[in-house]
Image (cartoon, coloured by chain):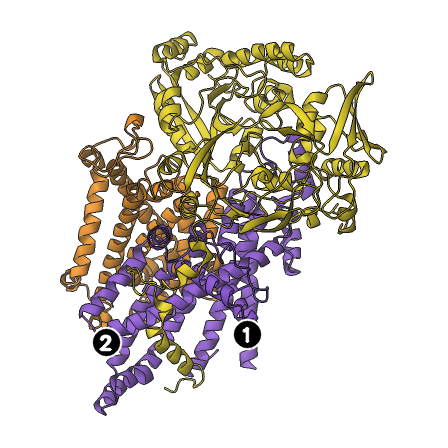
Chain colours: A yellow, B orange, C purple
């Protein structure tokens, strides 16, 4: 047989070369180490450059860098550094909003509406050099409502706002007309969030394509006035920010370049941190954080979080419809075991629906594992022989550094002690949400974080059936709770408001369809030369206050 | 046709095959006698004893819930072996039937069946399995169904090829001319004579199915925790790679060993059933 | 003429596969118990908002109508829009495909340049130590879970020894080469950028080996048995008897003829690399189709999942056609009939 003459010789040549070429070096046994390459790499430098920050975390949740659309952590963090909002929080004071793009504001009672007026900061400029005007604010806020994406409900549902609710009184004065069914104070809290970002309307309008309101343009770059600009977002690779040279605000960014690098495996994040290739590791587990103790050059930080990990019990499902059964289940859980062992004691035992740190937090934690009491309650409810129930859990990590599957297994064995059999059903988040929204789950586990720094961000979802959020999804149609949560939300006197939330939280704690398991902390591994790192419980990280 | 008379001695003459059989036998024993062998309940947590290193109390250490890793591995053998058998039997039977039907019927039926086979053959197996697992929900059974769905086309092709070459052999044409019914010809003549290659492929696919199931579990589409499935255990253990190495290491080694055993047995079978190869191994 | 009709038949076959694959994936996706709109909008959005989003995306229309629309778009090269990000799926595929192709090619090169020499070595030292070593190496390659191998390699070669990076395609502080093919190694050569070339090669090695180990094992075994067969043939024995040096016999006579079955196997392996790529990319943070498929499947973003499936499913018949064509060049006895 005569093989074709031009293909084969080259293949054979290539093969013969291959036999001795170092291209074949990586065998399972360390053969010829290309050590010469490694030290020349910037990766071998003990720390990243002084003006650069590398933040390793999973960023595949990012959908866009557009402030009117972004709602995921990896989108919100860059957005909140690249844009300014009218008002913001400073430090850890989440009770009072402070000036940002707006230097002053007032809330007027217009009879059947609230009137909010904001005066914009003189000399405020976007990174493009365009001045920030009231028209920009109107454009930005209308954009949120028109685009109807994930965060739009903050304006339409919490604020009760429509496209025509916004007006530019003059170049530097911006107004909002708000129905009295909404709380103006709560909406000011909403405005501190990334969704309240003011975009450069001239720049965005110039880059609109096919009436997309500039969503394609803003997808991977910014048009804001914040201390940073978003330079690029390469999907599943990194998000890069650089300091905004034209920044007019009062923060003084010291780090020039921020790289949020996609590292989905937390083991690799840990390695990178230990080797100084990353300054922040964002998704470490409890054990990994603990393993950093005594590792030179690293430190760890547990930041407050307002998230609550909870179990929902569908009150339309027998026998969960019986309040005594729900109470029995609450008494069957070994909270201390979960908090101290499973989560290494790095989370707080909180049992009310409002997290520690928000006004209205109720520190009463009456439940602890009491098998006799739980059995007694089941007997009173007429189900002393126990029952069996499905429990759907996300197939992902639970907040605080444990896995939902581990928490589920723990609950399964706790409930077994009172004769309740749990069938664990780890479910894709998407599937879980779909069934949850349709009231189709029996028991389930999830976490919930408030969207804004106000107790109403939890009071309504957990307490008000008509809001069609968590209470509704668990089929808990309770008029008393609904009345209490509405009443508390619209109370304007701070002291009375706290008292009202105390009543609401107490009521939901003992009657509601929830078992609040714990309030986690957010753990970060850090290089010890990084200064000023802070994680805000509204899930914002401010790069402009960090330095090395 | 292969003479089966002296195949057993030859099969066992290869030391590697014997090793494969021994390893597989050990795992099968674990699977059968799991409750006897395992010192602990694989699902019983003991939070105060979590993450213990290997010791006389926990031979291979304990996991993040204080469950005994060795007991979980032993019970995991049941799952992995069952996955292998289930997938291969389901896919093998279904694929062989399609293949034999296509090969025997010929014409339009053959064309139609083989085009469908082509479609399933073209699928990137893990991605289709991912989609199926997402569609049906996350469970061990669905994982096995998903893997079977991407495995059967191989058997269809293999058997059809065999049938095409056997179809015209004297004994088949003879049977046909004597008026034997189609079903009889298929089950009496065609299938048994295609058995050799099916068997070789099946033993190799057992390992493949176990690897695929573990892979699906690893990316979160396979068996659901707390099932002591080995892939789940590696997946959950990977965040302990630095701090508690035994958690991902031992389940990974278990997968490696059982798949290697199947591969060795498959090689042995191939050598035995294909006399041409004998001299070359 | 016969050649043209052969090609035409193959191309029609490829379209048939495309139709079947898209049909099956589409209906599997729509059997999902999960609502992609609910997934895209998170648990905080209201039910009305989700219903509105479904209407906007046309998810409330009959499934058959949706499929016809989808297929129509597909024939025009339009893969629809991602439900999660609202971006055209084709843009994402274009962004992620080159990384996967580069990784798969890397794995293929490992398989060829490691697998064939090992197979030859094994066949020439039959039943001696190198042969045993190669066979053990092959056995492990056929048995080790790819994700487990990846984890081990990272912890040894990155964490312990520091020889290779943990993941990604290029160093954080090295600028990727200008986009021509999307393959970083090739693009850096085209741009003459040595830093980028060094860095991207360096990043490619561990994942390529992880993904390619299985194929290397298969190739080595195939080469070994293929070589053993050829080495026993008369013309090789004749060549040896004539006193030709061993390496010439091996290179010119034995290997050349052993190559046909090897190419078949390598072609099939290349088509199957994508499944392994899903796992490899997860472990090595490799920004390719595998990670995209996983994220999309998790979020039940089915236009995205379908895009990956269709692309991957096309790859296989196209490759097998190319392999068949390569045969006819290598072995004139095989015709296109």
Q: Is residue B108 visible?
A: no
B229 versus C188 height, above or below: above
Q: Give coordinates of residue B117: x percent, y percent.
A: 46, 59
Which chain's residue wears label 1?
A: C
**From what the image shows, is residue A9 above or below residue B97?**
below
Residue under the image location 28 percent in, 42 percent down = B246
Can residue C189 be seen at all in this image of the molecule? yes
Q: Quadrant of residue A384?
A: top left
Please give left or right for residue C100 compared with residue B235 in the image: right
Helix, strand or loop for disc 2: helix
Between disc 2 and disc 1, the foreground one is 2
A337 to A83, vertically: above or below:
above
Marks 2 & 1 on one chain: yes
Q: Which residue is mark 1?
A: C7
Q: Secondary structure at mark 1?
A: helix
Please name the residue shown 26% across and 73% down the image.
Answer: C121
Which residue is pictured at 62% across the width and 48% down the height? A242
Q: How many discs appear?
A: 2
The disc at residue B34 is none
* Sequence-first tag of 2 and 1: 1
Q: Quick check: C191 left or right of B41?
A: right
> Label for residue C124?
2
- Residue B13 x %, y %: 14, 62
Image coordinates of residue A33 in percent, x first then y, are: 33, 63
């Amino acid at each position: 047989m005569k093989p074709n003459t031009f293909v084969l010789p080259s293949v054979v040549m290539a093969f013969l070369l291959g036999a001795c070429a170092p291209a074949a070096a990586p065998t399972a046994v360390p053969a010829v180490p290309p050590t010469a390459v490694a030290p020349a790499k910037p990766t071998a430098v003990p720390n990243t450059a002084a003006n650069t920050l590398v933040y390793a975390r999973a960023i595949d949740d990012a959908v866009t860098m557009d402030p009117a659309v972004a709602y995921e952590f990896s989108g919100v963090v860059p957005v909140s550094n690249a844009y300014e909002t009218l008002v913001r929080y400073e430090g850890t004071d989440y009770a009072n909003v402070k000036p940002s793009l707006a230097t002053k504001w007032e809330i007027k009672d217009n009879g059947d509406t609230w009137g909010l007026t904001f005066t914009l900061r003189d000399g405020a400029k976007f990174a493009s050099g365009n001045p920030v005007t009231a028209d920009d604010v109107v454009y930005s806020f209308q954009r949120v409502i028109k685009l109807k994406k994930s965060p739009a409900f903050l304006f339409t549902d919490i604020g009760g706002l429509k496209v025509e609710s916004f007006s530019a009184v003059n170049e530097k004065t911006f107004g909002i007309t708000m129905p009295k069914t909404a709380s103006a104070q709560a909406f000011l809290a909403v405005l501190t969030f990334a969704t309240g970002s003011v975009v450069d309307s001239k720049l965005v309008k110039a880059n609109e394509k096919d009436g997309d309101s500039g969503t394609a343009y803003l997808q991977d770059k910014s048009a804001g006035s914040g201390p940073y600009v978003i330079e690029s977002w390469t999907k599943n690779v990194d998000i890069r920010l650089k300091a905004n040279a034209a920044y007019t605000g009062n923060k003084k960014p010291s780090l020039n370049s921020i790289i949020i690098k996609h590292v989905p495996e937390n083991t690799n994040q840990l390695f990178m941190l230990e080797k100084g290739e990353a300054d922040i590791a964002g998704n470490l587990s409890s054990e990994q954080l603990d393993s950093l103790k005594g590792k030179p050059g690293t430190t760890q930080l547990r930041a407050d979080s307002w998230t609550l990990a909870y179990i929902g019990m569908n009150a339309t499902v027998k026998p969960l419809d019986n309040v005594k059964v729900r109470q029995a289940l609450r008494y069957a859980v070994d909270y201390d075991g979960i908090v101290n062992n499973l989560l290494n004691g790095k989370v707080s035992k909180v049992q009310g629906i409002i997290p520690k740190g928000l006004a209205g937090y109720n520190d009463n934690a009456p439940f602890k594992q009491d098998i006799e009491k739980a059995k007694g309650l089941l007997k009173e409810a007429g189900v002393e022989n126990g029952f069996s129930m499905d429990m759907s859990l996300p197939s992902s990590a639970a907040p605080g550094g444990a896995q939902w599957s581990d928490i589920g297994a723990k609950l399964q064995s706790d409930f077994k002690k009172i004769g309740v059999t749990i069938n664990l059903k780890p479910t894709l988040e998407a599937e879980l949400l779909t069934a949850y929204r349709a009231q189709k789950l029996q028991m389930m586990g999830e976490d919930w974080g408030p969207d804004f720094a106000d107790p109403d961000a939890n009071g309504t979802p957990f307490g008000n059936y008509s809001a069609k959020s968590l209470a509704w999804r668990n089929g808990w149609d309770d008029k008393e709770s609904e009345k209490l949560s509405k009443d508390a939300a619209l109370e304007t006197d701070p002291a009375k408001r706290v008292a009202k939330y105390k009543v609401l939280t107490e009521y939901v704690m003992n009657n509601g369809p929830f078992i609040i398991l714990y309030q986690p902390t957010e753990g970060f591994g850090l290089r010890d030369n990084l200064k000023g790192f802070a994680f805000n419980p509204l899930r914002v990280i401010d790069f402009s206050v960090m330095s090395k | 046709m292969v003479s089966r008379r002296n195949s057993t001695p030859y099969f066992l003459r290869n030391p590697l095959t014997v090793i494969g059989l021994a390893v597989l036998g050990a795992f099968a024993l674990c699977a059968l006698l799991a409750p006897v062998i395992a010192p602990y309940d694989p699902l019983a947590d003991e939070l105060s004893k979590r993450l213990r290193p290997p010791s006389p109390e926990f031979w291979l250490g304990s996991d993040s819930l204080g469950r005994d890793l060795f007991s979980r591995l032993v019970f995991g053998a049941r799952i992995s072996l069952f996955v292998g058998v289930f997938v291969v039997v389901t896919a093998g039977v279904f694929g062989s039937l399609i293949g034999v039907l296509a090969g025997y019927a010929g014409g339009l039926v053959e064309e139609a069946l083989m085009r469908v086979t082509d479609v399933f053959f073209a699928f990137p197996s893990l991605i289709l399995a991912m989609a199926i697992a997402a569609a049906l929900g996350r469970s061990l059974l669905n994982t096995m169904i998903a893997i079977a769905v991407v495995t059967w086309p191989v058997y269809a092709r293999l058997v059809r090829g065999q049938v095409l070459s056997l179809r015209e052999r004297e004994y088949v044409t003879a049977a046909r001319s004597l008026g034997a019914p189609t079903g009889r010809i298929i089950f009496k003549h065609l299938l048994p004579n295609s058995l050799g290659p099916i068997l070789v492929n099946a033993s190799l696919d057992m390992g493949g199915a176990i690897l695929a199931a573990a892979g699906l579990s690893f990316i979160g589409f396979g068996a659901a925790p707390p099932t002591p499935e080995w892939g789940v255990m590696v997946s959950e253990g990977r965040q302990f790679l630095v701090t508690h190495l035994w958690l991902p290491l031992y389940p990974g080694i278990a997968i490696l060993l059982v798949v290697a055993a199947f591969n060795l047995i498959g090689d042995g079978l191939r050598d035995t059933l294909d006399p041409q190869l004998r001299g070359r191994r | 003429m016969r050649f043209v009709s052969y090609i035409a038949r193959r191309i029609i076959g490829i379209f048939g596969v495309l139709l079947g694959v898209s049909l099956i994936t589409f209906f599997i996706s729509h059997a999902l118990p999960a609502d992609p709109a609910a997934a895209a909008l998170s648990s905080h959005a209201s039910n009305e908002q989700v219903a509105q989003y479904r209407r906007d995306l046309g998810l409330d229309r009959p499934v058959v109508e949706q499929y016809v629309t989808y297929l129509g778009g597909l024939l025009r090269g339009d893969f629809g829009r991602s439900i999660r990000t609202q971006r055209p799926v084709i843009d994402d595929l274009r962004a992620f495909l080159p990384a996967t192709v580069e990784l798969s090619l890397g794995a293929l090169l490992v398989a060829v340049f490691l697998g064939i020499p090992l197979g030859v070595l094994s066949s020439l030292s039959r039943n001696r130590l190198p042969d045993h070593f190669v066979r053990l190496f092959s056995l492990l390659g056929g048995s080790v879970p790819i994700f487990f191998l990846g984890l081990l390699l990272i912890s040894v070669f990155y964490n312990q020894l520091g020889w290779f990076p943990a993941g990604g395609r290029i160093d954080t502080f090295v600028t990727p080469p200008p986009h021509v093919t999307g393959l970083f190694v090739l693009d850096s050569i085209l741009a003459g950028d040595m830093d980028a070339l060094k860095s991207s090669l360096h990043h490619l090695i561990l994942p390529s080996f992880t993904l390619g180990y299985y194929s290397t094992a298969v190739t080595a075994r195939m080469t070994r048995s293929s070589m053993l067969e050829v080495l026993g043939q008369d013309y090789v024995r004749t060549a040896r008897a004539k006193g030709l040096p061993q390496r010439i016999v091996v290179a010119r006579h034995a290997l050349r003829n052993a190559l046909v079955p090897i190419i078949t196997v390598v072609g099939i392996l290349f088509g199957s690399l994508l499944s392994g790529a899903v796992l490899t990319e997860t472990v090595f943070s490799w920004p390719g189709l595998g990670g995209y498929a996983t994220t999309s499947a998790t979020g039940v973003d089915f236009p995205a999942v379908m895009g990956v499936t269709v692309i991957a499913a096309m790859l296989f018949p196209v490759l097998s056609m190319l392999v068949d064509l390569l045969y006819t060049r290598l072995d004139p006895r095989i015709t296109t009939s």
